[in-house]
Amino acid sequence: MLKPEIHPKYQRTTITCSCGAVYQVGSTRDNLRIEVCGKCHPVYTGGSQRLIDTGGRVERFKRKYGMK
Protein backbone atom coordinates (compact mmCIF):
# COMPACT_ATOMS: atom_id res chain seq x y z
CA MET A 1 0.00 0.00 0.00
CA LEU A 2 1.35 3.44 -0.97
CA LYS A 3 1.58 6.22 1.55
CA PRO A 4 -0.83 8.93 0.35
CA GLU A 5 1.25 12.04 1.08
CA ILE A 6 4.61 11.11 -0.46
CA HIS A 7 3.78 9.74 -3.92
CA PRO A 8 2.72 11.82 -6.96
CA LYS A 9 -0.71 11.18 -8.43
CA TYR A 10 -0.64 8.50 -11.14
CA GLN A 11 -3.14 9.26 -13.90
CA ARG A 12 -4.02 8.71 -17.56
CA THR A 13 -2.31 11.29 -19.76
CA THR A 14 -1.96 12.10 -23.45
CA ILE A 15 1.37 12.05 -25.26
CA THR A 16 1.41 13.99 -28.54
CA CYS A 17 4.27 13.60 -31.02
CA SER A 18 5.31 16.25 -33.54
CA CYS A 19 4.39 13.80 -36.32
CA GLY A 20 0.78 13.87 -35.12
CA ALA A 21 0.64 10.51 -33.31
CA VAL A 22 -1.31 10.54 -30.03
CA TYR A 23 -0.86 7.97 -27.26
CA GLN A 24 -2.79 7.44 -24.03
CA VAL A 25 -0.55 6.20 -21.20
CA GLY A 26 -0.27 6.28 -17.44
CA SER A 27 2.04 8.93 -16.00
CA THR A 28 2.56 11.31 -13.12
CA ARG A 29 2.67 14.25 -15.58
CA ASP A 30 -0.06 15.89 -17.67
CA ASN A 31 -0.19 16.08 -21.48
CA LEU A 32 3.35 15.50 -22.71
CA ARG A 33 4.65 16.71 -26.09
CA ILE A 34 7.51 14.81 -27.71
CA GLU A 35 9.50 15.27 -30.94
CA VAL A 36 10.09 11.64 -31.95
CA CYS A 37 8.01 8.52 -31.25
CA GLY A 38 7.92 4.90 -32.37
CA LYS A 39 5.79 5.85 -35.37
CA CYS A 40 8.24 8.36 -36.86
CA HIS A 41 11.70 7.36 -35.52
CA PRO A 42 13.95 6.05 -38.36
CA VAL A 43 15.02 2.98 -36.37
CA TYR A 44 11.42 1.82 -35.89
CA THR A 45 10.11 2.76 -39.34
CA GLY A 46 12.58 0.47 -41.11
CA GLY A 47 14.15 3.34 -42.99
CA SER A 48 10.93 4.31 -44.73
CA GLN A 49 11.32 7.89 -43.55
CA ARG A 50 14.47 9.81 -44.37
CA LEU A 51 16.12 12.59 -42.48
CA ILE A 52 16.70 15.73 -44.52
CA ASP A 53 20.29 16.95 -44.65
CA THR A 54 19.60 20.65 -44.18
CA GLY A 55 23.14 21.57 -43.23
CA GLY A 56 24.81 20.10 -46.32
CA ARG A 57 26.95 17.76 -44.23
CA VAL A 58 27.18 15.10 -46.91
CA GLU A 59 28.30 17.57 -49.57
CA ARG A 60 30.92 19.10 -47.26
CA PHE A 61 32.26 15.63 -46.43
CA LYS A 62 32.52 14.74 -50.12
CA ARG A 63 34.32 18.02 -50.93
CA LYS A 64 36.70 17.60 -48.00
CA TYR A 65 37.77 14.11 -49.03
CA GLY A 66 37.62 14.64 -52.80
CA MET A 67 34.69 12.32 -53.47
CA LYS A 68 32.44 12.88 -56.48
Image (tube, helix red, strand yellow):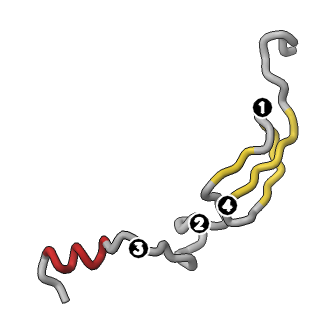
Sequence-earlier tag: 1 or 4? 4
Q: What is the three-letter code of the residue carrying label 2?
A: Tyr
Q: Earlier in the sequence, mark 1 or mark 2?
A: 1
Q: Amino acid at mark 3?
A: Asp
Tell me the distance, in whole angstroms, between the alpha carbons under discs 1 and 4: 21 Å
Question: Which residue lies under the disc numbered 3?
Answer: 53
Q: CA distance from mark 3 to mark 4?
A: 19 Å
Mark 1, residue position: 28
Residue 24 horizontal side relative to residue 47, left or right:
right
Type of amino acid at the residue the image marks with label 1: Thr
Residue pointed to by mark 4: 18
Query: Residue under circle 2?
Result: 44
Q: Are marks 1 and 4 in contact (CB under 8 Å)?
A: no
Tell me if label 1 and label 2 are in contact, CB under 8 Å: no
Percent coordinates x, y for residue 53 in the rendering: 41, 73
At 57% from the left and 79% from the top, the residue drawn is 48
